[in-house]
Amino acid sequence: MKEVYLDNSATTRPLPEVVEAMVASLTDNYGNPSSLHNKGLEAEKILKEARRKIADKLAVLPEEIIFTSGGTESNNLAIKGIAYNFQNRGRHLITTEVEHPSVLESFLALEEEGFEVTYLKADRHGQISLAQLEESITPETILVSIMHVNNELGTIYPLAEIGKLIKEKNPNTFFHADCIQSFGKILLHPASKQLDLLSISGHKIHGPKGIGALYKKKGIELKAQLTGGGQENNYRCGTENVPGIAGLIPALDALPAYTEEKPFDQEMDRLKKHFLKGLKKIKRKVIINSPEDGSPQILNISFPGIKGEVLIHSLAAEGIYVSTGSACHSKSREKSHVLRSIGLSPDVIDGTIRISFSPYNTIEELDYTLACIEKQLKTFF
């Protein structure tokens, strides 16, 4: 059976060279990077190389990179680390209603501890109001956390404008962005966006699961969430995941080199446009929930009157893998908070699926998927 994987925003298939690097780390370079003997030094070299490569992609310093277990931990460390460390300055925080659960749940936990949180509303395509953001910033605001690319809709948030606005309104407010869906797919330099903290994850860029990183601007102190042996400059204690970090290196090497002239993945943009063109030929009402100027890799669509969950299972029987939304909520019976926040009706939400591309997909795979969607709609709906 033909296999077409179009759930790349949930996770990506590791590159063969990623697997090879991880196996080599497990069989040969298996030392603890904190050990002083040769095995430890070889493991430490892996950490240094990966740290440098991430820093090069972001145009930051290697010492500004903290390894974590993934995007969720990076988000938690950034948000709670700032909140706890700077609560003497103020206890007001700002985020949006359409963030990833790892961000929203962190803010909800802080609210329970007495912090005040403002949740910015989103419009029909997930975009926020900069005017509302400006009005919300006060002298007590210590952190604003706004994602770069929405994981369900593909909405791109104007981080440069947001960063400028934040720093002009309150220079002491820190700015964090969940960049897990944008790193490796869109040009991303934190300095140009006045970002103080930035989260990334390895398994979204054809690297391993269980490894991520947090960019923390030099000079900013965080309250560590894991304490112990002093690893990662005491910001994230615990023996580093050397095999995961080793696997990051070839994944980083395979990423395109973006420029101001070519700031996003051109191949994924081509695939998305081709798929959109094909959708228009399907003789069934289709609602495109993603904005036209959204991320090249994410396309959120609805077929009112059908069950998205039934459609994804019928497509899986054809070897096609898509999702109904965020993988973190896919097993929850609660309707997507993102789709509810942008005002979609329950009928439209029920009929929603998310297609997410990778540069390794092909036009032939997309044509096969479109044909199968049309067949399934005629057969079962």
Image (tube, helix red, strand yellow):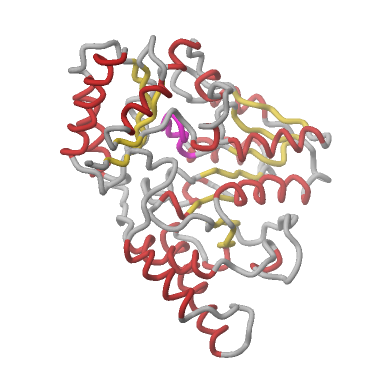
- Residue pictured at 72% horizontal, 70% vertical: 230
Question: What secondary structure characterizes most of the magenta part?
Answer: loop
Please say whether residue 156 is one of the residues in the magenta stretch.
yes
Q: Position of residue 207 (x, y in %)?
A: 41, 57
Q: Position of residue 9 (x, y in %)?
A: 41, 40
Numbered range of the magenta stretch: 148-157
229 magenta-colored: no
Q: Which one is in front, 240 or 193?
A: 240
Q: Residue at x 43, y 34 (%)?
A: 156
Indicate left or right for 305 with 370 as reference.
right
Outermost bottom residue: 37
Lateral position of residue 370 relative to residue 93, left or right: left
Vertical side of 140 occupied by 262: above or below: below
List x then y, in percent, for residue 85: 77, 51
**Residue 104 in which image quadrant:** top right
Q: Residue at x 55, y 48 (%)?
A: 195
